[in-house]
Amino acid sequence: MYSTLLNLLLVVPLIAAIPVPLEADFVNHNEATHGGEKAQFDEALGTANTQITNMQNVLKNPNDPRIAQAFGPNANLATIRSTVDKLATGTLKVHTSDPSFADKEAAQIAKDAAKAQGKDTSQMPDSRPVNGYVPVNRMGADVQMDPARFGSTFYSGNGENDKKFRA
């Protein structure tokens, strides 16, 4: 009994030290109608976690030329590391696995912007294919991010290039 307890006490701190990869939390999800899209999203999330690990490995060497190539010669490594670390253990809020939601919302945003400029919107589509976006609301110094939206372009295709595009 004591050896089992000792083993448990030794393993628990090790488990706590293992970072949990980036996960997704779907605000609205209907498995019956959008299970396929959710499976594609989960696959892309696996690829994204591989890319996050790659970024962490590159950041271990501050002189790696890929850092300057991606962020310029005066890259703020502390901010980049902090962002990558948040990605590595965070949860991405996703509005829904229904791609038509993002497509329709993007079309409505475009219509609203056109109306604000006094343009005729009668010929504008009610839906337009989009990849993904995160609505951001700025209230003075405060920034509020809504759950991410992923549209039909994100979910289209199952070829290897399509899978890389999703990640």
Image (cartoon, rainbow, N blue to C red):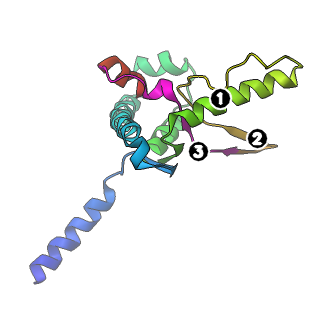
| Position above or below: 27 against 61 | below
Q: As shown in the figure, which amino acid type bears the numbered disc 1?
A: Ala
Q: Which mark is residue 138?
A: 2
Q: Earlier in the sequence, mark 1 or mark 3?
A: 1
Q: Is residue 99 left or right of residue 116?
A: left
Residues at marks 2 and 3 touching, judged by CB atoms closer than 8 Å: no
| Position above or below: 46 against 67 | below
Residue 127 falls inside the magenta stretch: no
Q: Which residues are magenta?
A: 144-159
Front disc: 2 or 3: 3
- Helix, strand or loop status at disc 3: loop
* Disc 3 packing (10 Å; few <14; some 14–19; many ≥20): some
Which residue is drawn at the image coordinates 74% and 16% (left, top)?
123
The residue pinned by badge 1 equals: 106
Which image quadrant for residue 110?
Answer: top right
Q: Is residue 10 left or right of residue 127?
A: left
Q: As shown in the figure, which amino acid type bears the numbered disc 3?
A: Pro
Measured from the top left, where is residue 67 in percent x and y? 46, 22
* Disc 2 packing (10 Å; few <14; some 14–19; many ≥20): few
Q: As shown in the figure, which amino acid type bears the numbered disc 2?
A: Arg
Q: CA distance from mark 1 to mark 2?
A: 19 Å
Q: Earlier in the sequence, mark 1 or mark 2?
A: 1
Q: Earlier in the sequence, mark 2 or mark 3?
A: 2
Residue 145 falls inside the magenta stretch: yes
Quadrant of the drawing holding the N terminus: bottom left
The residue pinned by badge 3 equals: 147
Residue with the most extreme bottom position: 1
* Disc 1 packing (10 Å; few <14; some 14–19; many ≥20): many
